[in-house]
Image (cartoon, grey):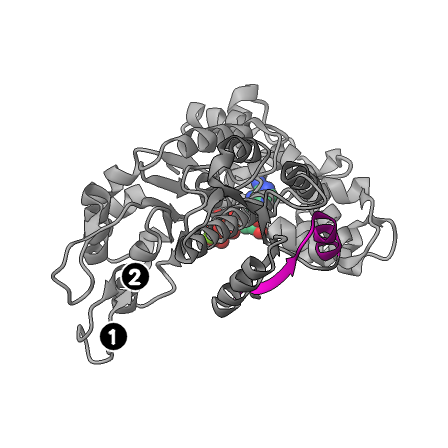
């Protein structure tokens, strides 16, 4: 859309000259000869900028300016004054005029002034738009949870966001919110209005990954018909998120290390050193330390990334959050699907809390979504939960059948506890979280007992 300009001047020749020049410069132009007419134009048309003569027959220029600003503070006003009118020009600037120009003026000078003014407006609008977008994205990136584990993570992310260059390593099981954490770091940092570029290192073949990350020069390989910028260049000023970094090949790992250390790299097939300002956030659900020991991951890169580690806690260890997140996702789905589910029944809650959630929050989100589709009443009942969740419910004896516990021999309680624990662990394939749930003790207590009875080795 063409920017639109309104000329307010009682001098007919002036009006026509300006009108012609500005129309040629591709603006939409309106013009009036009095203060009163100004507002009838403003009421009917969108105007971006007004050229306002300070001396009009019917109204004082300053008065019109104030009225224009009351009508719409966003309209740019350029005042046209006589040389002798400096005092008036100063008052006009104080009342919100964008600029003033002395009559007689050079048309080219006025054109440049208009161009600059409109450019400023569009930049202001762009910044506003980005701020709005940023706030919206940020809402989507909220990490929910009340347990100390997740509160700690949130505080840590808050602190990391205040740093600008330090690389970050996010570790955690699948679905624990690693990407969410990366978003939170970026959008809460000074880099928030710059790009956040993401790539999944396990999803792309090595050679392609290299040119995706670093770009290539024309002729670097047969298909390189033009030069192409890579992710690091595109993210300049912002953040690069390297997901599943544990799957990256060592030759690329050393290139990443160089980017971290020198903030520079070369495109594939290139000889030019390209400087960039990026923060690297890497994520993995693999045990990087073990990969280092096995020689699959470079030790130097590992140590470089390890400076700031965010460990995303798994869901099964934060029972309170299971219900909090369930309610959150129920509300989300209510809004999305126009449903009206109030929550989970007590039985369903029990099942949710007892389950081990190997797929963590993502799995929980999917379970709730599925249940909501099936739900036909006000609450989600066990019937709407998937089979594997209900199965774990069976691990809890509803009432104890004493006859089933056979007395073998009389022994000290501790010895019996040791034998019993060893059996439970064996039966559950050493799944400690299941064991702790069935035994009705915390994982920490179970771990302590395992240590006490030396059960972990066998
Ligand atoms: N604390 C949380 N609060 C709200 N939503 C969460 C939270 N943690 C995770 N989620 C949601 O769970 C889903 C999975 O999160 P995300 O993709 O960040 O996990 P991930 O660790 O990157 O998983 P993967 O290892 O599978 O890539 C997303 O939809 C995310 O919004
Ligand atoms: Mg992920």
Disc 2, SS: loop
Instruction: Determine if residue 430 is in view.
Output: no
Front residue of 109 and 454: 109
Q: Residue 30 — which label?
A: none
Disc 1, SS: loop
Which residue sits at x=55%, y=38%? 433
The magenta span reads 27-43
- Mark 2 residue crowding within 10 angstroms, few (<14) / some (14–19) / many (20+): some
Q: Are marks 1 and 2 in contact (CB under 8 Å)?
A: no
Q: Nearer the viewer, mark 1 or mark 2?
A: 1
Q: In the rendering, at what x and y percent does residue 212 appear?
A: 31, 64
List the single residue furthest toward the top.
Answer: 412
List the single residue furthest toward the right.
Answer: 377
Q: Quadrant of residue 343?
A: top right
Front residue of 7 and 232: 7
Which residue sits at x=15%, y=54%? 273
Q: Is residue 250 left or right of residue 378?
A: left
Magenta stretch: includes residue 244: no
Q: In the rendering, at what x and y percent does residue 286 appear?
A: 37, 48
Image quarter where the N terminus lies is bottom right
Q: Residue 226 — which label?
A: 1
Q: Is residue 214 left or right of residue 397?
A: left
- Mark 1 residue crowding within 10 angstroms, few (<14) / some (14–19) / many (20+): few
Front residue of 157 and 385: 157
Which residue sits at x=14%, y=59%? 272
Q: In the rendering, at what x and y percent does residue 185 appear?
A: 45, 39
Instruction: Determine if residue 449 is in view.
Output: yes
Q: Is the residue at mark 2 in contact range of ligand 2, meaning its CB lies under 8 Å from it?
A: no
Image quarter where the C terminus lies is top left
Is 216 placed above or below 137 here?
below
Judging by the rendered image, the residue that carries numbered circle 2 is: 230
Magenta stretch: includes residue 40: yes
């Amino acid at each position: 859309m063409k920017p639109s300009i309104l000329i307010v001047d009682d001098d007919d020749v002036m009006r026509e000259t300006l009108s012609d020049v500005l129309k040629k410069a591709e603006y939409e132009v309106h013009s009036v000869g009095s203060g009163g007419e100004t507002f009838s134009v403003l009421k009917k048309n969108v105007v971006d900028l007004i050229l306002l003569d300070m001396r009009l027959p019917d109204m004082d220029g300053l008065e019109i300016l104030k009225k224009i600003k009351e009508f719409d503070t966003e309209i740019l006003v350029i005042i046209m004054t006589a040389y002798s009118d400096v005092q008036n020009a100063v008052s006009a600037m104080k009342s919100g005029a964008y600029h003033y120009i002395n009559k007689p003026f050079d048309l080219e000078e006025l054109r440049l002034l208009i161009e600059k003014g409109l450019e400023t407006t569009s930049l202001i609008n762009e910044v506003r738009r980005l701020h709005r977008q940023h706030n919206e994205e940020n809402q989507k990136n909220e990490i929910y949870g009340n347990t100390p584990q997740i509160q700690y993570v949130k505080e840590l992310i808050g602190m990391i966001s205040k740093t600008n260059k330090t690389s970050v390593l996010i570790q955690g099981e699948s679905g624990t919110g690693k990407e969410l954490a990366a978003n939170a770091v970026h959008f809460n940092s000074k880099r928030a209005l710059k790009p956040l570029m993401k790539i999944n290192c396990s999803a792309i073949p090595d050679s392609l990954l290299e040119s995706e990350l670093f770009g290539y020069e024309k002729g670097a390989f047969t298909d390189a018909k033009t030069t192409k910028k890579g992710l690091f260049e595109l993210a300049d000023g912002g953040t690069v998120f390297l997901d599943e970094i544990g799957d990256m090949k060592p030759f690329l790992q050393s290139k990443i290390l160089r980017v971290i250390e020198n903030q520079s790299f070369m495109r594939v097939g290139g000889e030019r050193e390209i400087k960039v300002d990026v923060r690297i956030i890497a994520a993995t659900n693999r045990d990087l330390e073990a990969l280092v020991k096995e020689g699959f991951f470079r030790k130097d890169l590992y140590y470089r990334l390890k400076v700031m580690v965010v460990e995303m806690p798994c869901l099964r260890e934060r029972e309170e959050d299971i219900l909090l997140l369930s309610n959150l996702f129920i509300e989300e789905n209510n809004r999305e699907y126009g449903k009206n589910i109030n929550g989970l029944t007590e039985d369903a809650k029990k099942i949710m809390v007892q389950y081990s959630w190997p797929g963590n929050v993502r799995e929980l989100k999917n379970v709730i979504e599925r249940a909501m589709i099936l739900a036909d009443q006000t609450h989600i009942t066990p019937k709407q939960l998937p089979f594997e969740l209900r199965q774990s419910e069976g691990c809890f004896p509803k009432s104890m059948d004493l006859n089933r516990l056979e007395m073998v021999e009389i022994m000290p309680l501790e010895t019996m506890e040791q034998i019993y624990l060893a059996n439970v662990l064996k039966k559950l394939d050493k799944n400690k979280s299941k064991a702790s749930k069935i035994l009705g003790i915390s994982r920490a207590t179970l771990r302590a007992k395992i240590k006490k009875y030396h059960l972990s080795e066998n």
